[in-house]
Amino acid sequence: MPASGAAAAQLATAQRDLAGARAEISRLSDSVQGLERDRNARVAQLQQENAAISARLRQAQGTLDQIASAARLINSGSVGTPVASLPPVPTAGAGGNPLSGAAPGPQMREHTVAERDSLTGISERYYGTRNRWQEIYEANRDTLTGQTALRPGQRLRIP
């Protein structure tokens, strides 16, 4: 019987070791789950921050495009032209209506195509939306051979 006693002692030791290992695995599993929850929460927070930064970047890009467009209009319209000979800019009175000195009808502007310009990009600069490119195309149908046939230096009418 001494061999069976030794085997029983080894079995008991192995069972204690197994129970300890299972307890350690359970503790580690709980720890991993907690870390995974923290990681998922952090990823969600970073995604929200990224979306907010992207929105601010789009807004800033729109503002920069408007500033660049205004600068191009000012620079292209005033090169070699004395300020006194430039036509007056109509101003808005109460309610946003043009004052009586403004010319009737829609005001046409002109845009000089730069490299990498597109009708949608020009639409966004002048109208604040990429969806009005067709109006520009229609106003310039006589000079455009296709919707993507813009050439640098080409002058477009902007309704």
Image (spheres, rainbow, N blue to C red):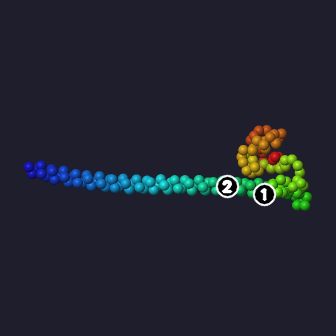
Q: Residue furthest right?
A: 85
User: Horizontal and vertical percent for residue 73?
Assistant: 81, 54
| Residue under the image location 38 percent in, 56 percent down | 31
**Residue wearing tag 2:** 59
| Residue under the image location 87 percent in, 55 percent down | 99
For residue 143, say whether it is visible. yes
Q: Secondary structure at mark 1?
A: helix
Tell me: 130 left or right of 81.
left
Tell me: 13 left or right of 99.
left
Identity, as a three-letter code, of the amino acid under mark 2: Gln
| Residue under the image location 68 percent in, 57 percent down | 60
Q: Is residue 31 above or below residue 143?
A: below
Query: How packed is label 2: few (under 14 Cα within 10 Å), some, or many (20 or more)?
Result: few
Tell me: 58 left or right of 123.
left
**Residue wearing tag 1:** 71
In this view, the residue in front, 68 or 123, is 123
User: Horizontal and vertical percent for residue 110?
Assistant: 83, 49
Identity, as a three-letter code, of the amino acid under mark 1: Ala
In this view, the residue in front, 150 or 71, is 71
Calculate the distance from the C-alpha at mark 1 to the C-alpha at mark 2: 18 Å
| Residue under the image location 27 percent in, 55 percent down | 20
In this view, the residue in front, 53 or 99, is 99
User: Horizontal and vertical percent for residue 17?
Assistant: 24, 54
Query: How packed is label 1: few (under 14 Cα within 10 Å), some, or many (20 or more)?
Result: few
